[in-house]
Image (cartoon, rainbow, N blue to C red):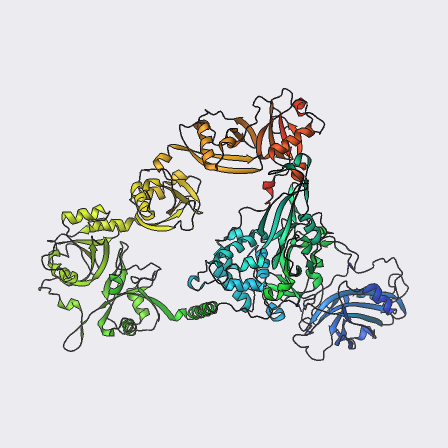
Amino acid sequence: MNQLGSDMLVDTEYDEKHEVAIISTDDAMDEVEPEPEPRADDFEAMMKRHLPEIPDQETEAEAIHTWEIKEWRSLSRREHGPVFDCGGHHWRILFFPYGNNVEFASFYLEQGFEDKPPEDWYACVQFLLVLWNPNDPTMHVMHQATHRFTAEEGDWGFTRFAELRRLFASQWDERGRPMVENNSAKITAYVRVLKDPTGVLWHNFINYDSKKETGMVGLKNQGATCYLNSLLQSLYFTTAFRKAVYQIPTEQEADRLNSAYALQRLFYLLQTNNSAVATTELTASFGWDSKQIFEQQDVQELSRVLMDKLDEKMKGTEAENALEKMFVGKMKTYISCINVDYESSRIEDFWDIQLNVSGNKNLDDSFKDYIQVETMDGENKYFAEGFGLQDAKKGVIFESFPQVLHLQLKRFEYDINRDAMMKVNDRYEFPEIWDASPYLSDHADRSEPYIYHLHGVLVHSGDLNAGHYYAFLKPTKDGHFYKFDDDRVTRATKREALEENFGGDYTNQANGNIQQRNPYTRTWSAKRSMSAYMLVYIRESRLDSILMTHQQVDPPPHLAQRFAEERAILERKRKEREEAHLYTEVQVASEDNFKAYQGFDIVPWKTEHDTPAHPRSYRVLRTTTLAQFTKVVADELGLEADMLRPWAMVNRQNGTVRPDVPIAYPDMSVEEAANKFGTKTVQFRLWMERTDERDEDGNPVFADAHIDLHGVSNNRPLMLFLKHFDAKSQTLLGVGNFYAAYQDRVCDISPQILKAMKWPAGTNFKLHEEIKQNMIEQMKPKVTLAQSEIQDGDIITVQKSLTEKEANQIIAVGGYTDAKEFYDYLLNRINVEFLPRFPTEPEDPNFILTLSKKMTYDQLAAKAGEYLKVDPTHLRFTTVNASGRPKMAVKYGQSGTLSNILAPSPYNYAGTQLPKPDMFYYEILELSLKELEQRKGVRITWLPDGIVKEETYELMIPRTGIVSDVLAALQKKAGISDEVMANVRIYEAHSGKFFKYLPMDYSILSINEFFILYAAHFPEDESAKKISVFHFDKEPNKTHGVPFQFPLKEGELFKDTKERLSQFTKIKGKQFDKIKFAVVGRPHYSKPEYIDDDEVLWDLMGSRDEIALGMDHVNKSRTNWNKTDSIFIR
């Protein structure tokens, strides 16, 4: 028995040594009731008064049972009352007369099975225990509780039911007699067994199995990905969507960085797993890091980005257009003239609909609000082509609704009074079945009813700063709703799915309390913190096809095969871990590896790539003998074991790894050999020397046996390695190993080299010794190998001598003519990735070039230009910072080497991120980079329609240019007509306020780079008195939007000025009506003086040039509160 904070006892074994949980009774005792307290023997009244039915819970059975306790002080430590029945279950009262390790009488309700109850047995019970004096039933003490009784928790009750001292006192609450009188009392149990339609009523979820209980599994939360989990479950149980995802061909590109493949894998696991599924693979395929994972995102935006990405993947496949057929509807935006036959309209697709919650009671109210018609009349008339200004109606109407309708409910809105985004917790009702036809146009196709059934309710609980997302989904046409709360899936009632997510006030609880505590904000509120933010409806006529009621949706076969392979790999690795102490790793290099390798040393020991040059790695038992191991290698090479001779590799002090000594102990174990000849810091490494020769007796003969030592003392065979530098093919590859005598001169080994190279006698060549990466020395012919300090395992590189003509041809194409130069190239080579800075076409390539760190800028540009087939002078490169973003443009003809360009001195980057050392962004320019650097970039915003539309352009103007040149370039770039252009001027703005107009002859070099440039229609009357206008949000220092200058009219009432402002800015209707206007002095902290309609702005301004007109309205750019970067999927 565990000690629980709830003060309740869970006791199934009745072991006196077990601890007991305790229930506090402070809140349950001695409450003053307005009505007379019923007598304890008035059982019906007591039950009605003290055990009221729980709202929305259905009763299965009720029972009242009284046990008369006699000879209290003579009872044992633990007693049981008689067994009684309720709801087909046996019950009894468990009684500790002297307290369960406390100075209180302890009473519990307990299941009454004679033996241990069935493992899956449970009952949901609301119960009341009343201890009373049979001589005076008005004297009683009671406690009530609710509990889910199970085989593990077979009893529940009250350890501190009543204090023993008080029970046996001569007077109970001054009533003239004790509660336990004559050593006896009665205890009555009122038991109500409740129905449990969801199977989880009062469940503690210990050892809860979603798959067993519901047939479905949940998704694990990575940190703050509950919003993602609810959306994914909704899409998964839109079965036709799952089928479309499965139809994306991924067999040939089964890369976990492929988001479509990762989603297929996730859906497969949801379909086949027995426990909750992780989403880490999927978010990794999206390109998300911890920033995105621990930051809740906008579900609507995520849904749209995911749909776009999948729609793109489905093009050209069996699933093409599947998503559009499923999720896309059509709406018409129109302006229809009232008095003439003219309508301007456009029909657009929509994937979801965003509905206002605030101010609307239900779904129908929101749709009525959405299609509300606005009348354009008076000063706001519509200009109809051919008819002039006309009264008109403006609005939106739906032409069709999709098969699956996603409705986004705007539960978060900006509160102007609090200057913050706030959650809208107002009650908002939505039906289980909904008719969309009232919101269709008269011309819509109504051949099928537009009746929709609720399929999903996605819920947010909490507020803007702290909360949780989960979903209620109805996976089948005629089935139940289920709650998907991250890794847990439970059955839900219709009330839980619908009404409890309407929001609004809590209903009155059984205890009269109308407040509840938000588990995420820890605050009490009378309003529900949980409410629907997204609804999924499916068209009634398409329920079977969308939910695929009579079809089985099977994942692609390659998914099951891939998971089986991965499970096998995991099992093998698990077994390897368990047996790791029995095995060791041995790396073996052979002549085949050496011949395939271009690089330093004999083979690439440390590379992780599996190439022909890479040594073979073996996992062998430590007790394996060298003879046994050599046979394993020989079998793989198709040789006899005695034709191989293992050499131990040694790490030299100069950083190279070379064969050191042959191991002539065939019976030595691999572990012993590794300890004796190997290096403890790395795997045991071997070189396998091979021979094809046998003597007359059939014994293998290795090449060292043929070396003539000439009887010279201190002479011995040396095993050397030969590489060949081919200047024509620009390759440096291994040839093989050969033997020479230690005291031979360098020129004496010419016959072996000519034979190995298959060159005719008399061929001229040069020899170099590869000592280490940065030390390549030419060998002198007359010096002995001993004098040259040659030893076993050393590398000699041979190069055929070139004619002058051959050398010049190689140099002309950028090649190397000398082995030492080529070694230097290998030492300084680098694979550099090039990415388009502004990709405009899908074919804009990412590519990788192998370059030298010693290259100049011109050589770099030439190599990239050659690959892209463009003029190198028209390329501009930009370095890349550590986060993958553009860092700094590389200047034309920049001095220094490629190494300097990619990784300049860290002093140049003090306090900032160093650039990536192997990556450039590139741009293909219209002008040469040299010419471009003689120009100045001018960023300008063109305002073609008041201030409601902004078009920003980057213009390149000669550095000697003036403002008129900027306008000419803008006209060409934006396609502005000469008629419009005649009245356009450029002005500067700073900190959201107008600064000055720029004269046509103003030098562009004088333009302040920290100011914003606007090009706009200039007021026709240049001599008119003007006032600067700016936008602010509540306080004048919180500027936003496009500032401008506006001409004033003497004597004009401000209500008429506002009409001209509306025409000038093109801000109209409700949006304009929300703006408040004020005159503001020059200091940014000046208090705004708000203007009435009957005031005259001309008079308010007077002769004060420092006065500006402020437009006070909400900064719409602040709508993405609590959000940083946009959601993306790689």
* Left or right of residue 550: residue 678: left
Q: Can you give x and y, in whole percent of width and height, for residue 654 in the image?
A: 26, 53
Q: Is residue 777 above or below residue 18?
A: above
Q: Is residue 265 visible?
A: no
Q: Nearer the viewer, residue 43 or 1053?
A: 1053
Residue sitting farthest toward the top = 1103
Q: Can you give x and y, in whole percent of width and height, for residue 513 in the image?
A: 77, 55
Residue sitting farthest toward the bottom = 114
Q: Nearer the viewer, residue 904 or 1072?
A: 1072
Q: Can you give x and y, in whole percent of width and height, for residue 900 in the image?
A: 33, 42
Q: Nearer the viewer, residue 1125 or 389?
A: 389
Q: Can you give x and y, in whole percent of width and height, for residue 393 in the image?
A: 67, 43
Q: Residue at x 39, y 38 (%)?
A: 908
Query: Dividing the picture into quarters, in which one does residue 870 lie?
Result: top left
* Left or right of residue 632: residue 719: left
* Left or right of residue 55: residue 253: left
Q: Is residue 211 visible?
A: yes
Q: How many marks?
A: 0
Q: In the rendered view of the protein, which quadrant contains the N terminus? A: bottom right
